[in-house]
Amino acid sequence: RGLLLATHNQGKVREFSAWLAPYAISISSAADHDLPEPEETATDFLGNATLKAEAAMAATGLPALADDSGLAVAALGGAPGLYSARWAGPDRDYQRAFDRIAAELGGAQAMEGAAAAFVCVLVLTLPGDTPLVAEGQVEGTLTASPRGAAGFGYDPIFRPEGEARTFAEMTMAEKAQFSHRARAMTNLAQVINVPAP
Ligand code: ITT
């Protein structure tokens, strides 16, 4: 029953669950159904989000919401972008990803203030209907070194525009006032014509 969050990322599950809480929809995630993690073979966010949502709906028969997202660093031509999860390695060691960004920018000092954006593409697949798509972005800058313990992934090195704190120094509700994922959800709500909470 209800909506399946087609993700294995518990950080995403927490954010979607909080965002959807006011709607009182029954929610489950990929782990609840023991779904395998599909290989992300597409060449863009939309392609990967589509294949994740379609695989989850095919396995369960439930409407499925998938998120493909990433951090795009302007001076790195948008990297890590589609490869954001992969830069952290199989053990999801984000210090490794931060070190790689610093190295490719020419040192930690070059990271401080470097322009970056988080991007999120959502695909909602519905049994017997065409999939719905929405996107959200947030611009910001990188910090020279990680700050804060909340959130997940690249949150400790990303400050949204106009804010001194990184996403990892905010509560989940504060992060949602800026985040690419919350903006994408607001856009998706508009697409299906339900009022945002
Ligand atoms: P699923 O595919 O199962 O949803 P995933 O983590 O592999 O989980 P992606 O392939 O979309 O998801 O990779 C997105 C990566 O981008 C994610 O693992 C983080 O490293 C980063 N990312 C995306 N949104 C983020 C956020 O809100 N805060 C921090 N990092 C984020």
Image (spheres, rainbow, N blue to C red):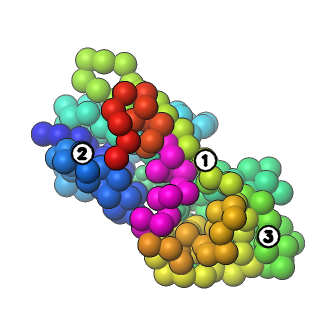
- Judge left or right: residue 149 versus residue 189: right
Badge 3 is on which residue? 113
Which of labels 2 and 3 is toward the front?
A: 2
Location of residue 28 in the rendering, given as x and y in whole percent from the top left corner = 21, 50
Can I make out residue 83 in this image? no
- The kind of secondary structure element at disc 3 is loop
Q: Nearer the viewer, residue 129 or 170?
A: 170
Q: Quadrant of the N terminus?
A: top left
> How many numbered badges does the structure rendering display?
3
Q: Residue furthest left?
A: 1
Label 2 vs 1, first from the N-terminus: 2
Residue at the image position 46 percent from the left and 76 percent from the top: 150
Residue at the image position 54 percent from the left and 81 percent from the top: 148
- Type of the residue with mark 3: Gly
Can you tell me whether the CB of the residue at mark 3 lies under 8 Å from the nearest atom of ligand 1?
Answer: no
The magenta stretch is 172-184
Can you tell me whether the CB of the residue at mark 2 lies under 8 Å from the nearest atom of ligand 1?
Answer: no
Q: What separation in Å lies between label 2 and label 3 (alpha carbons)?
A: 38 Å
Badge 2 is on which residue? 23
Can I make out residue 64 in this image? yes
Q: Which of 172 and 67 is in front in this view?
A: 172
Q: What separation in Å lies between label 2 and label 1 (alpha carbons)?
A: 23 Å
Q: Which of 185 and 149 is in front in this view?
A: 185
- The kind of secondary structure element at disc 1 is strand
Q: Which of 54 and 129 is in front in this view?
A: 129
